[in-house]
Image (cartoon, rainbow, N blue to C red):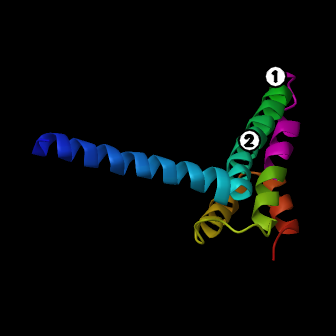
Amino acid sequence: MSIRTCRLAISLGIILAFVLGYYLGINLVLPGSANKLFRDASDTGYFAALISLASLDRLERGDADGAKRLLAQNVSSYCRSDMPDADPTRRAQFRHHAEELSARSAVLKELLAKSSP
């Protein structure tokens, strides 16, 4: 057996071991956690799309105030939620941007005042 063939066999063995370990880890050790992670990610995307669709529908019907209220409710509910973020500074930055926008949006200002800590 040549050195090149030996190196190829070792490389394929390492790759196969990695793939097998990944498969076993995902399917046997972490099935609930991994499935929940993927489901939560798709739920978040669905929720964002649902809010966008409802807002667009209200705008198309000429209900700009209703669309503003729907979006402002979503922003304020995020600001007052207890769910932890992956980045601890993200919620504070989001709140800061929301408060800046509330200077121009009366409905957002009203809803943020209700959600103040």
Q: Nearer the viewer, residue 95 or 1?
A: 1
Magenta region includes residue 71: yes
Circle 2 Cα neighbour tier, 10 Å, few/some/many (<14 / 14–19 / ≥20): few
Q: Quadrant of the N terminus?
A: top left
Q: Earlier in the sequence, mark 1 or mark 2?
A: 2
Q: Quadrant of residue 43?
A: top right
* Residue type at the position of mark 1: Glu
Q: Which region of the structure is painted magenta?
A: 60-72
Residue holding disc 2: 48
Query: How far apart in space, not on screen, are marks 1 and 2 (Cα)?
Result: 18 Å
Q: Nearer the viewer, residue 103 or 79?
A: 79
Residue lying furthest top in this view?
Answer: 60
Q: Nearer the viewer, residue 87 or 115?
A: 87
**Residue at 19% over, 46% down:** 7
**Magenta residues, dominant SS class:** helix
Q: SS at mark 2?
A: helix
Vertical relation: 42 (above or below) 80: above
Q: Quadrant of the C terminus?
A: bottom right
Q: Is residue 87 among what the camera can see?
A: yes
* Residue type at the position of mark 2: Ala
Residue 2: x %, y % from top left: 11, 41
Looking at the image, is mark 1 or mark 2 nearer the viewer? 2
**Residue at 60% over, 72% down:** 88
Q: Quadrant of residue 6?
A: top left
Residue 110's label in the rendered image is: none
Residue holding disc 1: 60
